[in-house]
Amino acid sequence: MAKKKAQKKRGWIGRQWLRLRYWLRRSVIWLMSLVILAVLLFSVVNPPFTFTMLSEKRALGRIDRQWVPMKEIAPVMRRSAVAAEDANFCLHWGFDIKAIRESLDDGGGRGASTISQQMVKNVYLWQGRSWVRKAIETLLTPLVELTWSKRRILEVYLNVAEFDEGVFGVEAAARHYFGVGPEALSAEQAARLAAVLPSPKTRSASEPTAFLRRRAVAIMDGAETIRGEPRARCFED
């Protein structure tokens, strides 16, 4: 009798385990399908908001943001963003291995995230440092690189990046700081906006510190250097 009860219990446990495995597999498949759908969707549809935008809107009450297509963004602004954040943007597949090695040699004090990684973080994930977020970002970035054009990645990046507290996207930033549209930005204005990107809440493009001025000059030089090079072909008209 005891033996039959034990066998019955083992059989019940086995059935429950099979049922759990079945639902786990289905859950993983559904999750992967949703992720792939989200990546494919935003390759052609403009993201309506990001987690950072929602967070800032809750804190500030409102945000300033207006989407603008790539053709209405001054070429010098595109080159400045690439020169400032990811000079090898057109040459890598989502990760700049050389920059990562240099960051490791520097003790991790130097940023090595590409524009593709930053775009993935801004659109699909949340801000802050955590291994979980970084792991998801690392998995999503190659998928985005595989399905999006480089031009689309840069377009979305420039439209969702925060340039000042509650100011998202290059259109809002250009008008907020300089009173012009993104198509009319000068080389210096574009460089200053790009210089703000790593720390938008502590830097000002219209009231630059001495450091930001020096950084903007370096970005202007970098933007001019990559003009017409293979490093700019993937997003130039």
Image (spheres, rainbow, N blue to C red):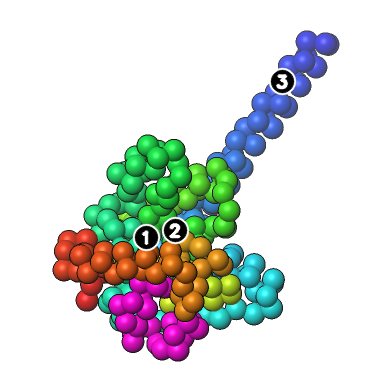
Residue 109 locus on image (x, y percent): 46, 45
Q: Is mark 2 on a helix, strand or loop?
A: helix
Question: Quick check: 206 left or right of 25?
Answer: left
Residue 81 figure quarter: bottom left
Q: Give the range drawn in magenta.
A: 171-194
Q: Mark 1 points at which residue?
A: 85
Spatial separation of the CA atoms under disc 1 and disc 3: 58 Å
Amino acid, disc 3 = Arg
Q: Is mark 1 on a helix, strand or loop?
A: helix
Q: What element carries label 3?
A: helix
Q: Mark 3 points at which residue?
A: 10
From this view, report whether residue 34 is shown above or below residue 61.
above
Residue 192 locus on image (x, y percent): 40, 72
The residue mark sitting in front, 2 or 3, is 2
The residue mark sitting in front, 1 or 3, is 1
Of the pair 206 and 14, the residue shown nearer to us: 206
Tell me the quadrant of the picture where the C terminus can be found: bottom left
Q: Is residue 172 magenta?
A: yes
Give yes or no for contact between labels 1 and 2 (Cβ–Cβ under 8 Å).
yes
Spatial separation of the CA atoms under disc 1 and disc 2: 9 Å
Of the pair 76 and 50, the residue shown nearer to us: 76
Tell me the quadrant of the picture where the N terminus can be found: top right
Are there few (<14), some (14-19), or many (20+) residues within 10 Å of tag 1? many
Amino acid, disc 2 = Gln
Q: Mark 2 points at which residue?
A: 118
Question: Nearer the N terminus, badge 1 or badge 3?
Answer: 3
Q: Does the magenta stretch include residue 115?
A: no
Q: Which residue is drawn at 54% across and 73% down?
A: 164
